[in-house]
Image (tube, helix red, strand yellow):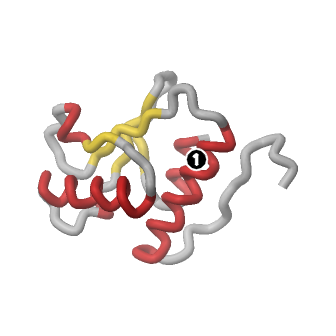
Amino acid sequence: MLVCGLLNVGIKCLESNAGLFCWADMRHLLGENSFEGEMALWKKIVYEVGLNISPGSSCHCVEPGWFRVCFANVSKEALSVSMNRIKAFVEPMHGPCGKWFEPRGSGS
């Protein structure tokens, strides 16, 4: 659900077959291709979007623009809200991202 939601807004993730987090490639959202640019994007996501994801530099990632998105112990409803916040943040920069989704069983 998380990886598909991120892909729907143009954010690719590293492939895996299990885990509690994913590595999201947000290099294309950086204002500046540097760790300072990564921190600026992280601050926007924290303060404007209201989500706290980990900048890759805090996890010793050697390339700026990668973020660790943890989804452990997150309900489908909370994940849907998070994905819609990310969509609202990314769309003004890159245009409409196509269809979105509702969590299964939401009745909407």
**Residue at 21%, 54% in the rendered image:** 38
Q: Quadrant of residue 26?
A: bottom left
58 in relation to 64, above or below? above
Q: How many marks?
A: 1
Kind of residue indicated by mark 1: Cys
17 in relation to 93, above or below? above
Graded by Cα atoms within 10 Å as few (under 14), some (14 to 19) or many (20 or more), the crowding at tag 1 reads: some
**Residue at 67%, 38% in the rendered image:** 76
**Residue at 13%, 52% in the rendered image:** 35
In the picture provided, is 10 more to the left or to the right than 54? Answer: right
In the picture provided, is 55 more to the left or to the right than 76? Answer: left
Q: Quadrant of residue 54?
A: top left
Q: Position of residue 40 (x, y in %)?
A: 22, 60
Residue where numbered disc 1 is placed? 4
Q: Position of residue 41 (x, y in %)?
A: 28, 59
89 in relation to 3, above or below? below
**Residue at 78%, 42% in the rendered image:** 104
Q: Quadrant of the C terminus?
A: bottom right
Q: Secondary structure at mark 1?
A: helix
Extreme-right residue of the structure: 107
Q: Quadrant of the N terminus?
A: top right
76 in relation to 36, above or below? above
Q: Position of residue 97 (x, y in %)?
A: 56, 68
